């Protein structure tokens, strides 16, 4: 049983499971991309595989956040403001670098769309924050620091 799970995580199945989990984790739906990344790295810790896993998790997590941004973009402006909207209004697009933070990070892209923050700045800052998070996590799991 353990061997079949390990071989699944070390192969393409683990990569796609990580992609789906990373996408869902960046929305208000539950997901556990960090745990899957850790398991996939433990199953196949080669450098090229680690780079692929970090790139895939970053890409799909960013895509999920940009989906939330698009939903926020089309919500009428009658939505009441909250802390995430107030923070993003103050920080602008660079505040989306914190979209990886648990709980508040799920709301930031939605708030960015609602505030009409542009697509490209939102994408750039969101991707930067999420890629940094997965990179640091992978380096720590691989024992680099």
Image: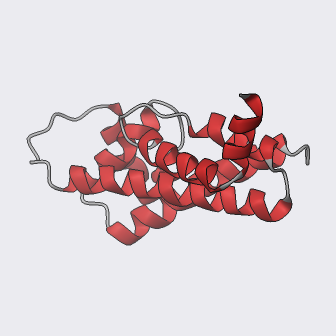
Residue sitting farthest toward the right: 144
Q: Nearer the viewer, residue 120 or 19?
A: 19
The answer to whether one can see residue 135 in this image is yes
Q: Nearer the viewer, residue 85 or 133?
A: 133
Query: Can you say which quadrant of the picture contains the C terminus?
Result: top right
Q: Is residue 115 visible?
A: no
Front residue (pair 106, 59): 59
Quarter of image, res 39: top right
Indicate left or right for 100 with 40 as reference: left
Tell me: 112 left or right of 7.
left
Residue under the point 84% across and 61% down: 47
* Identity of the residue drawn at 40% across and 39% down: 106
In the image, residue 30 sits, relative to residue 26, either above or below, namely above
**Near-viewer residue (15 or 104):** 15
Q: Position of residue 66 (x, y in %)?
A: 37, 57
Residue 54: image location, x then y, percent: 67, 56
Q: Residue furthest bottom?
A: 120
Question: In the picture provided, is 80 more to the left or to the right than 138?
Answer: left
With 5 as the anchor, is 61 left or right in this view?
A: left
- The x, y position of residue 1, in whole percent, is 71, 28
Residue at (16, 33) in percent of width and height: 80
Q: Position of residue 119 (x, y in %)?
A: 34, 67
- Residue at image point 52% right, 52% down: 19
């Amino acid at each position: 049983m353990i061997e079949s799970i390990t071989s699944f995580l070390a192969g393409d199945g683990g990569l796609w499971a990580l992609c789906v989990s990373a996408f869902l984790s960046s929305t208000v739906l539950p997901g556990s991309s960090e745990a899957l990344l850790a398991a996939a790295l433990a199953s196949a810790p080669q450098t090229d595989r680690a780079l692929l896993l970090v790139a895939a998790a970053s890409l799909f997590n960013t895509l999920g956040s940009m989906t939330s941004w698009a939903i926020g973009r089309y919500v009428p402006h009658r939505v009441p403001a909250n802390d995430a909207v107030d923070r993003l209004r103050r920080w602008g697009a660079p505040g989306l670098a914190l979209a990886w933070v648990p709980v508040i990070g799920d709301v930031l892209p939605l708030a960015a769309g609602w505030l009409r923050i542009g697509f490209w700045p939102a994408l750039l800052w969101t991707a930067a924050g999420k890629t940094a998070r997965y990179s640091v996590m992978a380096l720590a799991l691989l024992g680099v620091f």
